[in-house]
Amino acid sequence: MSPAFRAMDVDPRTKGVLLEPFVHQVGGHSCVLRFNETTLCKPLVPREHQFYETLPAEMRKFTPQYKGVVSVRFEEDEDRNLCLIAYPLKGDHGTVDSVDNSDCEPKSKLLRWTNKKHHVLETEKTSKDWVRQHWKEEKMKSHKLEEEFEWLKKSEVLYYSVEKKGNVSSQFKHYNPWSMKCHQQQLQRMKENAKHPNQYKFILLENLTSRYEVPCVLDLKMGTRQHGDDASEEKAANQIRKCQQSTSAVIGVRVCGMQVYQAGSGQLMFMNKYHGRKLSVQGFKEALFQFFHNGRYLRRELLGPVLKKLAELKAVLERQESYRFYSSSLLVIYDGKELPEVALDSDAEDLEDLSEESADESAGAYAFKPIGPSSVDVRMIDFAHTTCRLYGEDSVVHEGQDAGYIFGLQSLIDIVTEISEESGE
Protein backbone atom coordinates (compact mmCIF):
# COMPACT_ATOMS: atom_id res chain seq x y z
CA MET A 1 0.00 0.00 0.00
CA SER A 2 1.44 3.39 -0.95
CA PRO A 3 1.65 5.98 1.85
CA ALA A 4 0.24 8.61 -0.47
CA PHE A 5 -3.47 8.68 -1.20
CA ARG A 6 -6.01 10.77 -3.04
CA ALA A 7 -6.49 14.42 -2.11
CA MET A 8 -10.27 13.91 -2.12
CA ASP A 9 -9.93 11.73 1.02
CA VAL A 10 -9.61 14.87 3.18
CA ASP A 11 -12.13 17.67 3.56
CA PRO A 12 -10.14 20.93 3.06
CA ARG A 13 -12.59 22.83 5.26
CA THR A 14 -11.59 20.96 8.39
CA LYS A 15 -9.16 22.34 10.92
CA GLY A 16 -5.77 20.73 11.20
CA VAL A 17 -3.40 20.06 14.07
CA LEU A 18 0.26 21.05 13.89
CA LEU A 19 2.49 18.06 14.58
CA GLU A 20 5.65 18.62 16.58
CA PRO A 21 8.72 16.46 17.14
CA PHE A 22 8.24 13.96 19.94
CA VAL A 23 11.18 14.87 22.16
CA HIS A 24 11.27 11.58 24.06
CA GLN A 25 11.88 9.32 21.06
CA VAL A 26 15.17 7.56 21.77
CA GLY A 27 15.24 4.81 19.13
CA GLY A 28 13.83 3.55 15.87
CA HIS A 29 14.05 5.09 12.41
CA SER A 30 10.36 5.87 11.91
CA CYS A 31 9.46 9.41 12.92
CA VAL A 32 7.14 9.75 15.93
CA LEU A 33 5.32 13.07 16.22
CA ARG A 34 3.41 14.78 19.02
CA PHE A 35 -0.28 15.26 18.22
CA ASN A 36 -1.09 16.57 21.68
CA GLU A 37 -0.06 15.95 25.29
CA THR A 38 -1.48 12.44 25.47
CA THR A 39 -1.37 11.36 21.81
CA LEU A 40 1.41 10.64 19.32
CA CYS A 41 1.29 9.77 15.64
CA LYS A 42 3.57 7.92 13.24
CA PRO A 43 3.44 6.92 9.57
CA LEU A 44 0.88 4.21 8.93
CA VAL A 45 2.39 0.84 8.00
CA PRO A 46 -0.38 -1.58 6.95
CA ARG A 47 1.02 -4.49 8.95
CA GLU A 48 1.34 -2.43 12.14
CA HIS A 49 -2.13 -0.97 11.58
CA GLN A 50 -3.52 -4.48 11.26
CA PHE A 51 -1.79 -5.49 14.49
CA TYR A 52 -3.48 -2.73 16.47
CA GLU A 53 -6.86 -3.44 14.83
CA THR A 54 -6.70 -7.17 15.75
CA LEU A 55 -4.76 -6.96 19.02
CA PRO A 56 -5.58 -9.73 21.53
CA ALA A 57 -7.34 -8.26 24.59
CA GLU A 58 -4.78 -9.54 27.09
CA MET A 59 -1.97 -7.77 25.24
CA ARG A 60 -3.57 -4.32 25.38
CA LYS A 61 -2.09 -3.41 28.77
CA PHE A 62 1.37 -3.98 27.28
CA THR A 63 0.94 -1.83 24.15
CA PRO A 64 0.06 1.84 23.55
CA GLN A 65 -3.64 2.54 23.14
CA TYR A 66 -4.57 2.78 19.46
CA LYS A 67 -6.65 5.91 18.70
CA GLY A 68 -7.29 5.85 14.97
CA VAL A 69 -5.94 7.19 11.66
CA VAL A 70 -5.39 10.74 10.38
CA SER A 71 -4.20 12.32 7.15
CA VAL A 72 -0.92 14.27 7.34
CA ARG A 73 0.44 16.72 4.82
CA PHE A 74 3.16 19.34 4.86
CA GLU A 75 2.49 23.05 4.50
CA GLU A 76 4.55 26.21 4.82
CA ASP A 77 4.18 28.71 7.64
CA GLU A 78 4.57 32.47 7.20
CA ASP A 79 8.37 32.08 7.44
CA ARG A 80 8.33 29.43 4.69
CA ASN A 81 9.25 26.67 7.15
CA LEU A 82 7.70 23.32 6.39
CA CYS A 83 5.26 21.97 8.98
CA LEU A 84 3.38 18.69 9.21
CA ILE A 85 -0.38 19.11 9.70
CA ALA A 86 -2.83 16.36 10.67
CA TYR A 87 -6.41 16.30 9.37
CA PRO A 88 -9.27 13.84 9.94
CA LEU A 89 -10.02 11.52 7.06
CA LYS A 90 -13.08 12.42 4.99
CA GLY A 91 -16.19 11.11 6.70
CA ASP A 92 -14.21 10.35 9.87
CA HIS A 93 -14.13 13.69 11.68
CA GLY A 94 -14.69 11.92 14.96
CA THR A 95 -11.14 10.54 14.87
CA VAL A 96 -9.56 13.92 15.49
CA ASP A 97 -12.51 15.45 17.33
CA SER A 98 -12.63 12.57 19.81
CA VAL A 99 -8.98 13.07 20.73
CA ASP A 100 -8.56 15.87 23.24
CA ASN A 101 -6.49 18.50 21.44
CA SER A 102 -7.21 21.35 23.82
CA ASP A 103 -3.49 21.73 24.46
CA CYS A 104 -2.65 22.00 20.74
CA GLU A 105 -1.48 25.52 19.96
CA PRO A 106 -1.62 25.59 16.18
CA LYS A 107 -5.32 26.08 15.43
CA SER A 108 -5.43 29.87 15.03
CA LYS A 109 -1.91 29.92 13.66
CA LEU A 110 -2.71 27.23 11.14
CA LEU A 111 -5.80 29.04 9.91
CA ARG A 112 -3.64 32.07 9.17
CA TRP A 113 -1.27 29.85 7.21
CA THR A 114 -3.96 28.28 5.06
CA ASN A 115 -5.68 31.63 4.43
CA LYS A 116 -2.40 33.23 3.46
CA LYS A 117 -1.07 30.39 1.35
CA HIS A 118 -4.42 29.33 -0.17
CA HIS A 119 -3.75 25.67 0.57
CA VAL A 120 -0.16 25.65 -0.61
CA LEU A 121 0.90 22.39 -2.27
CA GLU A 122 -2.75 21.54 -2.84
CA THR A 123 -2.16 20.32 -6.37
CA GLU A 124 0.50 18.22 -8.00
CA LYS A 125 1.49 21.16 -10.23
CA THR A 126 2.05 23.41 -7.22
CA SER A 127 4.12 20.69 -5.59
CA LYS A 128 6.39 20.35 -8.61
CA ASP A 129 6.82 24.11 -8.94
CA TRP A 130 7.66 24.41 -5.29
CA VAL A 131 10.19 21.57 -5.46
CA ARG A 132 11.94 23.11 -8.47
CA GLN A 133 12.02 26.53 -6.78
CA HIS A 134 13.58 25.21 -3.59
CA TRP A 135 15.65 22.36 -5.02
CA LYS A 136 19.05 23.95 -4.39
CA GLU A 137 18.10 24.95 -0.86
CA GLU A 138 16.77 21.50 -0.06
CA LYS A 139 19.91 19.80 -1.40
CA MET A 140 21.95 21.96 0.98
CA LYS A 141 19.66 21.01 3.88
CA SER A 142 19.89 17.35 2.92
CA HIS A 143 23.68 17.53 2.92
CA LYS A 144 23.62 19.19 6.33
CA LEU A 145 21.29 16.48 7.64
CA GLU A 146 23.67 13.78 6.44
CA GLU A 147 26.54 15.52 8.25
CA GLU A 148 24.49 15.73 11.44
CA PHE A 149 23.55 12.07 11.13
CA GLU A 150 27.20 11.07 10.77
CA TRP A 151 28.01 13.16 13.85
CA LEU A 152 25.23 11.38 15.76
CA LYS A 153 26.64 7.98 14.83
CA LYS A 154 30.04 9.00 16.19
CA SER A 155 28.58 10.65 19.31
CA GLU A 156 26.96 7.49 20.64
CA VAL A 157 26.64 8.63 24.27
CA LEU A 158 25.93 12.27 25.02
CA TYR A 159 25.63 14.24 28.27
CA TYR A 160 23.98 17.64 28.64
CA SER A 161 23.86 19.79 31.77
CA VAL A 162 20.41 21.21 32.52
CA GLU A 163 19.05 23.87 34.81
CA LYS A 164 17.75 21.94 37.82
CA LYS A 165 15.75 24.93 39.04
CA GLY A 166 13.79 25.19 35.80
CA ASN A 167 11.43 22.79 34.09
CA VAL A 168 13.72 19.87 33.28
CA SER A 169 11.21 18.22 30.96
CA SER A 170 10.94 21.31 28.74
CA GLN A 171 14.69 21.19 28.15
CA PHE A 172 14.54 17.79 26.43
CA LYS A 173 13.50 19.44 23.17
CA HIS A 174 16.81 21.28 23.03
CA TYR A 175 18.94 18.22 23.62
CA ASN A 176 17.44 14.96 22.32
CA PRO A 177 19.45 14.38 19.13
CA TRP A 178 17.66 11.21 17.99
CA SER A 179 14.22 12.83 18.06
CA MET A 180 15.36 15.73 15.90
CA LYS A 181 17.15 13.41 13.46
CA CYS A 182 14.00 11.33 12.92
CA HIS A 183 11.85 14.43 12.48
CA GLN A 184 14.20 15.95 9.90
CA GLN A 185 14.48 12.70 7.99
CA GLN A 186 10.68 12.36 7.88
CA LEU A 187 10.34 15.85 6.41
CA GLN A 188 13.05 15.04 3.91
CA ARG A 189 11.31 11.82 2.80
CA MET A 190 7.99 13.60 2.37
CA LYS A 191 9.53 16.47 0.41
CA GLU A 192 11.38 14.11 -1.89
CA ASN A 193 8.08 12.32 -2.49
CA ALA A 194 6.35 15.56 -3.48
CA LYS A 195 5.68 14.19 -6.97
CA HIS A 196 2.89 12.20 -5.30
CA PRO A 197 -0.20 13.85 -3.80
CA ASN A 198 0.93 15.61 -0.66
CA GLN A 199 -1.04 13.52 1.84
CA TYR A 200 -0.08 10.56 3.98
CA LYS A 201 -1.83 8.35 6.51
CA PHE A 202 -0.56 8.33 10.10
CA ILE A 203 -1.84 6.31 13.06
CA LEU A 204 -2.62 7.87 16.44
CA LEU A 205 -1.22 6.17 19.55
CA GLU A 206 -1.12 6.82 23.28
CA ASN A 207 1.79 8.96 24.49
CA LEU A 208 3.28 6.66 27.11
CA THR A 209 5.49 9.42 28.56
CA SER A 210 2.69 11.92 29.21
CA ARG A 211 2.14 10.84 32.83
CA TYR A 212 5.78 11.48 33.75
CA GLU A 213 7.28 14.88 34.50
CA VAL A 214 10.84 13.90 33.53
CA PRO A 215 10.55 10.68 31.50
CA CYS A 216 13.50 8.31 31.58
CA VAL A 217 13.12 5.99 28.59
CA LEU A 218 14.85 2.74 27.66
CA ASP A 219 14.22 1.27 24.17
CA LEU A 220 15.17 -2.40 23.89
CA LYS A 221 15.20 -4.28 20.59
CA MET A 222 13.73 -7.68 21.43
CA GLY A 223 14.27 -11.14 20.00
CA THR A 224 17.03 -13.14 18.33
CA ARG A 225 15.73 -12.29 14.82
CA GLN A 226 14.90 -8.83 13.47
CA HIS A 227 14.03 -9.25 9.78
CA GLY A 228 10.46 -9.89 8.68
CA ASP A 229 9.35 -12.72 6.43
CA ASP A 230 8.97 -10.25 3.56
CA ALA A 231 12.52 -8.89 3.85
CA SER A 232 14.78 -9.00 0.79
CA GLU A 233 17.86 -11.21 0.90
CA GLU A 234 20.03 -8.14 1.38
CA LYS A 235 17.86 -6.78 4.19
CA ALA A 236 17.69 -10.16 5.93
CA ALA A 237 21.46 -10.61 5.70
CA ASN A 238 22.02 -7.14 7.13
CA GLN A 239 19.67 -7.78 10.08
CA ILE A 240 21.21 -11.21 10.74
CA ARG A 241 24.66 -9.59 10.83
CA LYS A 242 23.51 -6.94 13.33
CA CYS A 243 22.08 -9.64 15.58
CA GLN A 244 25.20 -11.80 15.38
CA GLN A 245 27.44 -8.85 16.21
CA SER A 246 25.37 -7.70 19.19
CA THR A 247 23.80 -9.07 22.35
CA SER A 248 20.68 -10.00 20.33
CA ALA A 249 22.20 -13.35 19.34
CA VAL A 250 23.43 -14.15 22.86
CA ILE A 251 20.61 -12.96 25.14
CA GLY A 252 17.81 -12.03 22.70
CA VAL A 253 17.83 -8.30 23.51
CA ARG A 254 19.95 -5.23 22.83
CA VAL A 255 19.86 -1.53 23.68
CA CYS A 256 18.25 0.52 20.91
CA GLY A 257 18.22 3.87 22.73
CA MET A 258 18.12 5.46 26.16
CA GLN A 259 17.57 8.78 27.87
CA VAL A 260 18.11 9.24 31.60
CA TYR A 261 17.95 12.28 33.83
CA GLN A 262 20.68 12.02 36.45
CA ALA A 263 19.36 14.24 39.21
CA GLY A 264 22.60 13.96 41.18
CA SER A 265 24.66 15.67 38.49
CA GLY A 266 21.85 17.59 36.79
CA GLN A 267 22.64 15.91 33.47
CA LEU A 268 20.63 14.34 30.69
CA MET A 269 22.27 11.25 29.24
CA PHE A 270 21.42 9.91 25.78
CA MET A 271 22.64 6.60 24.35
CA ASN A 272 21.85 5.64 20.76
CA LYS A 273 21.47 2.33 18.96
CA TYR A 274 24.97 2.40 17.49
CA HIS A 275 26.43 2.21 20.97
CA GLY A 276 23.86 -0.40 21.96
CA ARG A 277 24.99 -2.70 19.16
CA LYS A 278 28.58 -2.65 20.42
CA LEU A 279 27.78 -3.65 24.00
CA SER A 280 28.85 -7.01 25.38
CA VAL A 281 26.51 -8.87 27.74
CA GLN A 282 28.34 -7.27 30.66
CA GLY A 283 28.09 -3.89 28.93
CA PHE A 284 24.36 -4.43 28.46
CA LYS A 285 24.01 -5.12 32.18
CA GLU A 286 25.98 -1.97 33.01
CA ALA A 287 23.74 0.05 30.67
CA LEU A 288 20.66 -1.20 32.53
CA PHE A 289 22.29 -0.31 35.83
CA GLN A 290 23.00 3.16 34.47
CA PHE A 291 19.40 3.52 33.31
CA PHE A 292 18.07 2.91 36.83
CA HIS A 293 20.74 5.11 38.48
CA ASN A 294 20.00 8.78 39.09
CA GLY A 295 23.59 9.91 39.59
CA ARG A 296 23.54 9.43 43.36
CA TYR A 297 21.99 6.04 43.94
CA LEU A 298 20.26 3.15 42.19
CA ARG A 299 16.47 3.53 41.95
CA ARG A 300 15.97 0.14 43.57
CA GLU A 301 12.30 0.75 44.27
CA LEU A 302 11.71 0.46 40.50
CA LEU A 303 13.29 -2.95 40.03
CA GLY A 304 10.55 -4.99 41.70
CA PRO A 305 7.72 -3.45 39.63
CA VAL A 306 9.78 -3.88 36.45
CA LEU A 307 10.36 -7.56 37.19
CA LYS A 308 6.66 -8.07 37.93
CA LYS A 309 5.59 -6.48 34.64
CA LEU A 310 8.21 -8.41 32.64
CA ALA A 311 7.00 -11.69 34.17
CA GLU A 312 3.37 -10.79 33.36
CA LEU A 313 4.26 -9.94 29.78
CA LYS A 314 6.23 -13.16 29.38
CA ALA A 315 3.23 -15.17 30.59
CA VAL A 316 0.95 -13.36 28.12
CA LEU A 317 3.26 -13.94 25.16
CA GLU A 318 3.63 -17.61 26.05
CA ARG A 319 -0.12 -17.91 25.40
CA GLN A 320 0.01 -16.24 21.97
CA GLU A 321 -0.03 -18.73 19.09
CA SER A 322 1.60 -17.91 15.76
CA TYR A 323 2.66 -14.34 16.59
CA ARG A 324 6.19 -13.23 15.65
CA PHE A 325 7.21 -9.75 16.78
CA TYR A 326 10.18 -9.27 14.47
CA SER A 327 12.07 -5.99 14.98
CA SER A 328 9.70 -4.76 17.70
CA SER A 329 10.93 -2.96 20.79
CA LEU A 330 10.16 -2.93 24.48
CA LEU A 331 9.98 0.41 26.29
CA VAL A 332 10.73 0.84 29.98
CA ILE A 333 9.71 4.26 31.31
CA TYR A 334 9.85 5.89 34.74
CA ASP A 335 9.92 9.41 36.17
CA GLY A 336 13.36 10.88 36.78
CA LYS A 337 11.94 13.73 38.85
CA GLU A 338 13.67 14.07 42.19
CA LEU A 339 11.67 12.83 45.19
CA PRO A 340 12.36 13.44 48.89
CA GLU A 341 14.78 10.82 50.16
CA VAL A 342 15.45 9.15 53.49
CA ALA A 343 18.26 6.99 54.81
CA LEU A 344 17.15 3.36 54.80
CA ASP A 345 17.85 2.99 58.54
CA SER A 346 15.79 6.04 59.56
CA ASP A 347 13.16 5.69 62.28
CA ALA A 348 9.46 6.01 61.54
CA GLU A 349 9.32 9.33 63.43
CA ASP A 350 12.07 10.67 61.19
CA LEU A 351 10.03 9.74 58.13
CA GLU A 352 7.07 11.78 59.33
CA ASP A 353 9.12 14.93 59.81
CA LEU A 354 11.44 14.57 56.84
CA SER A 355 11.30 17.33 54.27
CA GLU A 356 13.00 17.54 50.92
CA GLU A 357 15.53 19.99 52.32
CA SER A 358 16.51 17.76 55.23
CA ALA A 359 16.77 14.80 52.88
CA ASP A 360 19.26 16.70 50.75
CA GLU A 361 21.30 17.62 53.82
CA SER A 362 21.44 14.01 54.93
CA ALA A 363 23.06 12.89 51.67
CA GLY A 364 26.36 11.17 52.18
CA ALA A 365 27.73 7.67 52.57
CA TYR A 366 24.30 6.25 53.37
CA ALA A 367 21.80 4.29 51.32
CA PHE A 368 18.69 6.25 50.41
CA LYS A 369 15.25 5.54 49.08
CA PRO A 370 12.71 8.05 47.75
CA ILE A 371 9.58 8.90 49.68
CA GLY A 372 6.31 8.74 47.77
CA PRO A 373 4.93 6.62 44.94
CA SER A 374 7.16 5.49 42.11
CA SER A 375 5.73 3.99 38.96
CA VAL A 376 7.33 2.29 36.00
CA ASP A 377 5.81 1.30 32.67
CA VAL A 378 6.72 -1.61 30.36
CA ARG A 379 5.21 -1.60 26.83
CA MET A 380 5.76 -3.25 23.47
CA ILE A 381 6.00 -0.93 20.45
CA ASP A 382 6.82 -1.03 16.71
CA PHE A 383 4.93 -3.79 14.91
CA ALA A 384 5.73 -3.04 11.26
CA HIS A 385 7.16 -6.55 10.78
CA THR A 386 4.84 -8.49 13.09
CA THR A 387 3.12 -11.54 11.62
CA CYS A 388 0.38 -13.92 12.72
CA ARG A 389 -1.86 -16.54 11.13
CA LEU A 390 -4.68 -13.98 11.36
CA TYR A 391 -2.92 -12.03 8.62
CA GLY A 392 -4.31 -14.12 5.78
CA GLU A 393 -2.14 -12.63 3.04
CA ASP A 394 1.16 -13.75 4.65
CA SER A 395 2.99 -16.46 2.73
CA VAL A 396 4.67 -17.78 5.88
CA VAL A 397 2.58 -18.95 8.83
CA HIS A 398 4.43 -19.67 12.07
CA GLU A 399 3.35 -22.10 14.77
CA GLY A 400 3.67 -21.78 18.54
CA GLN A 401 5.25 -18.98 20.56
CA ASP A 402 7.76 -16.33 19.56
CA ALA A 403 10.64 -18.15 21.26
CA GLY A 404 13.23 -15.49 20.39
CA TYR A 405 11.23 -12.68 21.99
CA ILE A 406 10.41 -14.76 25.06
CA PHE A 407 14.08 -15.72 25.37
CA GLY A 408 14.96 -12.01 25.38
CA LEU A 409 12.36 -11.32 28.07
CA GLN A 410 13.77 -14.09 30.27
CA SER A 411 17.30 -12.73 29.80
CA LEU A 412 16.06 -9.28 30.79
CA ILE A 413 14.37 -10.72 33.88
CA ASP A 414 17.57 -12.53 34.85
CA ILE A 415 19.76 -9.44 34.42
CA VAL A 416 17.42 -7.09 36.32
CA THR A 417 17.21 -9.73 39.06
CA GLU A 418 21.03 -9.82 39.25
CA ILE A 419 21.18 -6.02 39.51
CA SER A 420 18.57 -6.09 42.27
CA GLU A 421 20.34 -8.81 44.27
CA GLU A 422 23.79 -7.28 43.86
CA SER A 423 22.50 -3.91 45.07
CA GLY A 424 21.16 -5.48 48.26
CA GLU A 425 17.48 -5.41 47.40
Image: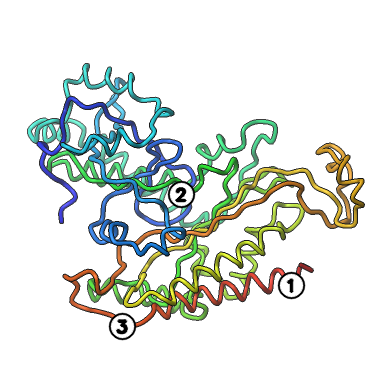
- Please name the amino acid that badge 1 sits on: Glu
- Mark 3 neighbour class, 10 Å CA radius: few under 14, some 14 to 19, many 20 or more: few
- Please name the amino acid that badge 3 sits on: Glu
- Please name the amino acid that badge 2 sits on: Gln
Report the front residue among 316 and 259: 316
Q: Quadrant of residue 40?
A: top left
Q: Is residue 266 left or right of residue 383?
A: right
Q: Is residue 35 above or below residue 243?
A: above
Q: Earlier in the sequence, mark 3 or mark 1?
A: 3
- Discs 3, 2 touching: Cβ within 8 Å: no
- Discs 2, 1 touching: Cβ within 8 Å: no
Report the front residue among 220 and 372: 372
Badge number at residue 25 = 2
Q: Residue at x 48, y 59 (%)?
A: 379
Give the CA distance from mark 3 to mark 1.
Answer: 37 Å
Q: Is residue 267 left or right of residue 15?
A: right
Give the CA distance from mark 2 to mark 1.
Answer: 31 Å
Give the CA distance from mark 3 to mark 2.
Answer: 33 Å
Badge number at residue 399 = 3
Question: SS for tag 2?
Answer: loop
Question: SS for tag 3?
Answer: loop
* Image quadrant containing the N terminus: bottom left
Q: Residue at x 56, y 64 (%)?
A: 309
Q: Residue at x 31, y 28 (%)?
A: 81
Q: Is residue 378 left or right of residue 192?
A: right
Mark 2 vs mark 1: give the one in front: 1
Which residue does the numbered mark 1 point to in the structure image?
Answer: 421
Q: Measured from the top left, where is residue 397 in percent x and y?
A: 24, 79
Q: Residue furthest bottom?
A: 399
Q: Measured from the top left, where is residue 130 in percent x and y?
A: 16, 31
- Mark 1 neighbour class, 10 Å CA radius: few under 14, some 14 to 19, many 20 or more: few
Badge number at residue 88 = none
